[in-house]
Image: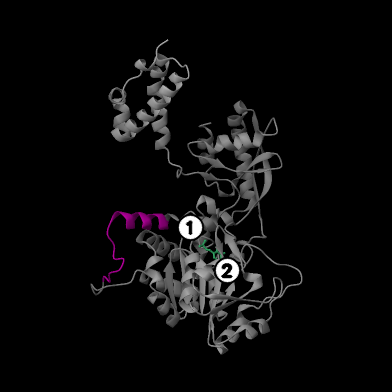
Amino acid sequence: MTGFRALPSVDQLVHALPLLVEAHGRQPVTAAARARLDAAREAIRSGADGAIEAARLPHLLAADLAGQAVTQLRPILNLTGTVLHTNLGRAILADEAIAAASAAMAAPLALEYDLATGGRGQRDDHLRDLLRELTGAEDATIVNNNAAAVLIALNTFGQGRQSIVSRGELIEIGGAFRMPDIMSRAGTQLVEVGTTNRTHPRDYRDALSDQTGLILKVHTSNYRIEGFTAEVAAPQLAPIAHEAGVVLLNDLGAGSLVDLSRWGLRREPTVAEAVAEGADLVTFSGDKLLGGPQAGFIVGRRDLIARINKNPMKRAVRLDKIRIAALEATLRLYRDPARLAQRLPVLRMLSRAQSDIIAQAARLAPQVAALLAPLGYDAAVVDCASQVGSGSLPTDTIPSAGLRLTGAGGDAPDRLAARLRALPRPVIGHIHAGALILDLRCLQEDADLLAALADL
Ligand SMILES: *Cc1c(COP(=O)(O)O)cnc(C)c1O
């Protein structure tokens, strides 16, 4: 039985592991060595043998450092069936957008510089003309995300004044984004009108006063009220706002730039329609149905956009060059709607036919079953239902297909889900009716899944 004296010093231990130092750097190896030596001393104090503890150290250190080198942000396979999964980073980008973002990272670019005159330019200029063309709006400004778009618009026109919203539209998007809280942070006083299920034009008219700054209309994208309901649509609301000389702001949320029914999906109001319906300003997200990077757009009247751009908050919520480059490339794809579903991954995934996904599941089932058999699991083809996600088209599911993975024991799906999450390329499914389901709608290549599972 040997004690503490069998342990090396931190320096001796680090010195004895030159390959680890070369791979990870001296500082991380020293920190890991210190932590492991502390743990070894603790073990010896509780009766462990010093020589055995010392012999384990190189192996433990190598594992610690390898673990630290793996990023949580490694690519995963999203087989949850939710195409725009907020917790998994929402939209994946088109090749054109990825190339533009990479180029913007690697070299200087004329972000706020006019190449024609050599004078100063504005970073939003790169997107303004495309947005005007695609939405029919007079002008546009771009911010960090749609939450910021709503915040800065409310602050610009509602600060120290009142903002009118229907009680049926006082939504929570998720996380801490609740419309009443955003309003108070924007410095505007919320005036609620109507009831949860019914709001009428007279409710808005009665609430207008010389204190009113704006009327806010919110597209209730993540829930739907059905039954005995009445809402005041934007075309009815616009004249009410304009007679009173206040701004009508329509927060669309997902904000599609094209009519999705063209690809067999349910119609969502497009941004161009919202503009044509008479809203002074329309806000929407870059990374929901639009299929780009995280961003928030405000499009609408030129004089109002100019006031938003003068708000000092704009500087705090502006976009960086990488995302501006990716957005410009993404928006360009919309100029050719006929090829959009091939080039924009979000639309490509959403518009995939169920028959195509069933065929993929049938191809993969025997191979996946063979990979899982040693773990005691089987795989079979199953029909399932995908969702758009991110609060878009919430009550709609899209017929899909996938693999149903089953094993013995009540906790079999949870145990397998944990194994798949721990893979070098994690595979994320969802548990339904006692099985782990892998919805294949978002699986681009069969080989991606087989390669990921080969590491089991
Ligand atoms: C999603 C959503 C937001 C927030 O947009 P982010 O881009 O996630 O910041 C705001 N309003 C509505 C109606 C939404 O659906």
Which amino acid, mark 2? Pro
Image position, residue 93 (x, y; %): 46, 55
In the displayed structure image, the side of residue 285 where residue 4 appears, left or right: left
User: In the displayed image of the protein, which residue is found farthest to the bottom?
Assistant: 243
Which residue range is magenta in the image?
96-115
Write the residue at 42% across / 28% down: 63
In the displayed structure image, the side of residue 75 where residue 109 appears, left or right: left
Mark seen at residue 343 = 1
Is 10 or 327 nearer to us in this picture? 10
User: In the displayed image of the protein, which residue is found farthest to the left?
Assistant: 118
Q: Is residue 414 magenta?
A: no
According to the picture, the residue beneath numbered tag 2 turns out to be 180
Image position, residue 111 (x, y; %): 31, 66
Which amino acid, mark 1? Arg
Write the residue at 41% across / 62% down: 329
Is 259 or 269 nearer to us in this picture? 269
Where the N terminus falls, by quadrant?
A: top left
Q: Is residue 113 visible?
A: yes
Image position, residue 364 (x, y; %): 60, 38
Question: Helix, strand, or loop for circle 2?
Answer: helix
